[in-house]
Image (cartoon, rainbow, N blue to C red):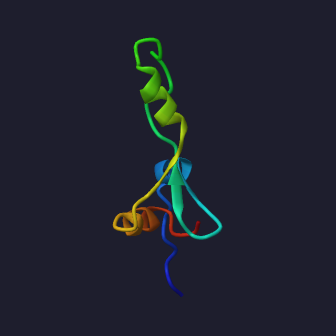
Amino acid sequence: MGNKMKTNRGAAKRFRVTGSGRIKFKRAKMRHILTKKKTKMKRHARAGGYISKQEEHLVRQMIPYK
């Protein structure tokens, strides 16, 4: 019987796998001290992002069952 792999719990909370298999994430810098940050920066941070194809394998190692 093969061993189960452990999921990296930190990564599991930060990444989601879409229906098509892409990995999406939420951008940083939107938690606190928002008054001194530029509006443009906050606007761009609201939009999520997708992990690039070159780095997807690294995230998939951390979240093998998603």
x and y percentages locating residue 24 in the rendered image = 53, 55
- Residue at image position (34%, 67%) is 54
User: Is 65 or 26 nearer to us in this picture?
Assistant: 26
- Using the image, determine if residue 21 lies above or below residue 7: below
Q: Most extreme residue toward the top, as rendered?
A: 35
**Occupied quadrant, residue 16:** bottom right
- Residue at image position (44%, 35%) is 28
Position of the C terminus by quadrant: bottom right
- Using the image, determine if residue 37 lies above or below residue 16: above
Image-based side of 55 in relation to 18, left or right: left
x and y percentages locating residue 22 in the rendered image = 53, 65
Q: Most extreme residue toward the bottom, as rendered?
A: 1
Q: Most extreme residue toward the left, as rendered?
A: 54
User: Is 43 or 34 nearer to us in this picture?
Assistant: 43
- Residue at image position (55%, 48%) is 13
Position of the N terminus by quadrant: bottom right
Q: Most extreme residue toward the front, as rendered?
A: 40
x and y percentages locating residue 26 in the rendered image = 52, 43
x and y percentages locating residue 55 in the rendered image = 36, 63
- Using the image, determine if residue 14 lies above or below residue 56: above
User: Is 44 or 18 nearer to us in this picture?
Assistant: 44
Q: How many labels does the image show?
A: 0
